[in-house]
Amino acid sequence: MSNLSPWKKDFSIFVPQAQPYLCYLDTAATCLTPKHVAEAMFHYQCYSHANSHQEKDQINSSEIDKLEQAREKVACFIGAQQRQSIVFNTGATDGVNQVAYGYVEPIIVAALKKGQHCNIVISAAEHHSNILAWQRLVKAYQVELRIAPLAIDGLIDIARLALLLDENTCILAFSHCSNVIGKMNPVEKICQLAKSKGIATLIDGAQAVLRSHCTVATIDCDFYVFSAHKIYGPTGCGVLYVKPDILREMLPSQWGAGMAKNVNYKESEFFSGPSRFESSTPNMASIVGLVEAIDYLNDLSLKEINLYLDDLAMYMHKSLSELAFYRPVVDKKITLRQAKMSTLVSFQCQNIHCQDVASLLRSENIALSCGNHAAQPLHSALAIEETLRVSLGIYNGYADIDKLIASLSHCHQMMALEDFV
């Protein structure tokens, strides 16, 4: 494989006038933006911007078409059978909240009226965004929050998960891929287990939608959420996939003019389908950017991208595992047995504080994450306070990993020397 990515040239941040020496290893936090996406959004704002909720004219008609075409594009990208299953929002966090308050809360209220109790099940590896909304419901309605433990390999322990699911479980919400551990959970098996017990499933796909060859129809989940900026699109835009039969029964969690068909002072009539959940003016510039990102990835070939990332990930894990002071959150011997390696890894350097390592690496123009990565309960369960996290994107190459390894080695030598003195 080439030392440099064949697609790095598509990202303007690396041009000589910007940051040509940047070693960006923080894609799990947010992907850098290719110029194709930025140009598509610029063109939209300059030449075709309008409000899709206004009365139809030449521009607004085109705006409505763009919105529905975008639904079709996203539906195809994630393997949904109908474009009407696609709801646009501000991101994966917004999607979780829409499900929590538009679907789960009414179930809890109805159960309480009958004198029944509910429980919500999540995994031990969830991002804060897939914890906080459920905590709010737990506190408001005295609902039980159950935590599905992880197996030794870092994946959800399905056997122990099964013991937590019962007739009072109103939803199972879990990540397709942990933003700390980086492995793909067996989502089809988990959803099949939940379905056998009549339990709805929500999957946080933020870290997996690009790498998993996601097909929501095959997974058979009820809800799937992800953010545009995790697939080289813009921030401020996300997607909530909802099964059509659930979408018809689900309630909006926000109310506004965009969802209203007819309004008077006594009552209002709302649109059916996804428009009922898009209460305000859609963020069309970001939706245009999301569509352009999908087109860009498809033009490059998702298969080719993932083969490239597979090779790069293997090189990263192998290179890190050869460092004597490297301590991954999952045992490195287990990690290296995988056929398909994760493009993100969280780790510590033995006897060196993570913040010290991160500070030195940043001084050498290496961007990575340091801390609990908005997954503090998982770190607590692992009995560690913080980790370093390295994550790869299509702009990375062997040279970036080589620079990381050299800098980590330099850091360890410096810290060891300081300790000696």
Image (cartoon, grey):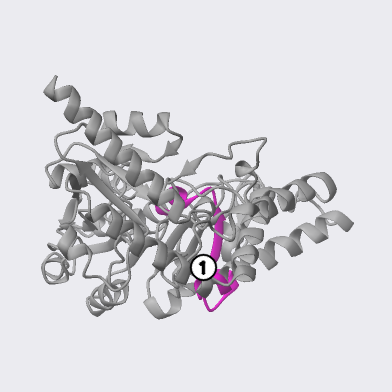
Q: Residues within 10 Å of mark 1 (few under 14, many from 20)?
A: some
155 vs 133: above or below: below
Residue 284 is one of the magenta-drawn residues: no
The kind of residue on which mark 1 rests is Ile
Q: Is residue 206 left or right of residue 329?
A: right
Could you tell me residue 266's position as x and y percent? 61, 47
Residue 83 is one of the magenta-drawn residues: yes
Could you tell me residue 186's position as x and y percent? 28, 72
- Give the residue at mark 1: 305
Q: Is residue 62 left or right of residue 94?
A: right
Residue found at the far top of this picture:
421
301 vs 258: above or below: below
The residue that appears at 73% across and 50% down in the rendered structure is: 39
| Observer-nearest of 316 and 86 | 316
| Observer-nearest of 415 and 274 | 415
Q: Which residues are magenta?
A: 76-97
Quarter of the view holding residue 256? top right
Q: Is residue 160 visible?
A: yes
| Observer-nearest of 170 and 33 | 33
The residue that appears at 54% across and 58% down in the rendered structure is: 5
79 vs 92: above or below: below
Image quadrant for the C terminus? top left
